[in-house]
Image: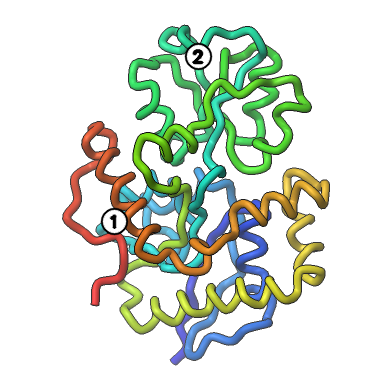
Amino acid sequence: MTSVLTLGYSPCPNDTYIFYALTHGRLALKGIELAPPLLEDVEMLNLMALEKKLDVTKLSFHALGHVLDEYCVLSSGAALGRGCGPLLVAKSGIDPSSLKGAEIAIPGRLTTANLLFRMYCPNAKKIRELRFDTIMDAVIRGDVDAGVIIHESRFTYAEKGLVCLQDLGKWWEESSGYPIPLGCIAARRSLGKECIKQIDRAIRQSIDWADQHLEECLPYIQHHAQEMNREVMQNHIGLYVNDFTRELGIEGIAAVEKFLQLGREAEILPDSCQSIGLQE
């Protein structure tokens, strides 16, 4: 009997690159059928995970800390690395020491960007949630004093006249010694070990397929990208699809566990005894 599973991921180039083959009939799953994928902003996917709406989904690692009883992390598909973290940006001239009283835009309550910023600046009180692709314009207009940007924005903020007050990923790397864990692909534990392992393998195969067939993937990636410039899209893929994406590995797992541990110590994440991955 074939099981039909629901799947959600973001429209960002790294996710559409990862899932192209799997969602376009280039790979087969034995005994598993995927419903048409839901492409949503990662914060929407985070909120849906709180309600257990999807079987397999992209999640911010911040959100993962709230749903570990229900979801486990797959070893493939993660966004994790060095030099790829969120940036705190503002108009030129703002004094970084004034952040305590500044109004800061974040790309969602459950995003990794928000948890990182709260760790970096725990005294900041004026926080405004905005969709990630509206934050730079809000800073430019003066609606907020500064903003935490993610995704393609890190490649385009300078040309919009903004300056980086703090590379939050660099701050994390220097303070923790680990690469920054941004997001993962998670599966509901109730799917069972064999099903989850097959999905995990299929995602790795989908990445391998995309590596060999970039030109076929590009129209789909470009259709969903916020930034249509091909160079920006390929820079995005090159930064966020890396060795950790293909296999989280020992260092990646340690980075995630450290991130969740510090989130709990900051009393932002709930305590949990559940492992991040699939228990054997």
Asked if residue 236 is positioned above or below residue 129 in the image, the reply reads: below
Q: Residue 48 at what x, y percent from top left?
A: 44, 51
| First-in-chain label (1 vs 2) | 1
User: Secondary structure under badge 2?
Assistant: strand
Q: Residue 262 at what x, y percent from top left?
A: 27, 39
Mark 2: few, some, or many residues within 10 Å (few <14, many ≥20)?
some
Image mark count: 2
Could you tell me the amino acid type at mark 2?
A: Glu
Name the image quarter holding the C terminus. bottom left
**Quarter location, residue 87:** top right
- The answer to which of 125 and 174 lies nearer the viewer is 174
Could you tell me the amino acid type at mark 1?
A: Leu
Name the image quarter holding the N terminus. bottom left
Residue 101 disc label: none
Q: Which residue is mark 1?
A: 68
Please give left or right for residue 17 compared with residue 266 in the image.
Answer: right
Asked if residue 220 is positioned above or below residue 92 in the image, the reply reads: below
- The answer to which of 95 and 185 lies nearer the viewer is 95
Q: Residue 197 at what x, y percent from top left?
A: 40, 79
Name the residue rendered at 59%, 59% in the picture: 241
Please give left or right for residue 200 compared with residue 235 in the image.
Answer: left
**Quarter location, residue 270:** top left
Mark 1: few, some, or many residues within 10 Å (few <14, many ≥20)?
many
Name the residue rendered at 47%, 52% in the picture: 183
Name the residue rendered at 49%, 78% in the picture: 4
User: Secondary structure under badge 1?
Assistant: loop
Name the residue rendered at 81%, 69% in the picture: 215
Q: Which residue is mark 2?
A: 103
**Distance from label 1 to label 2 (Cα)?**
31 Å
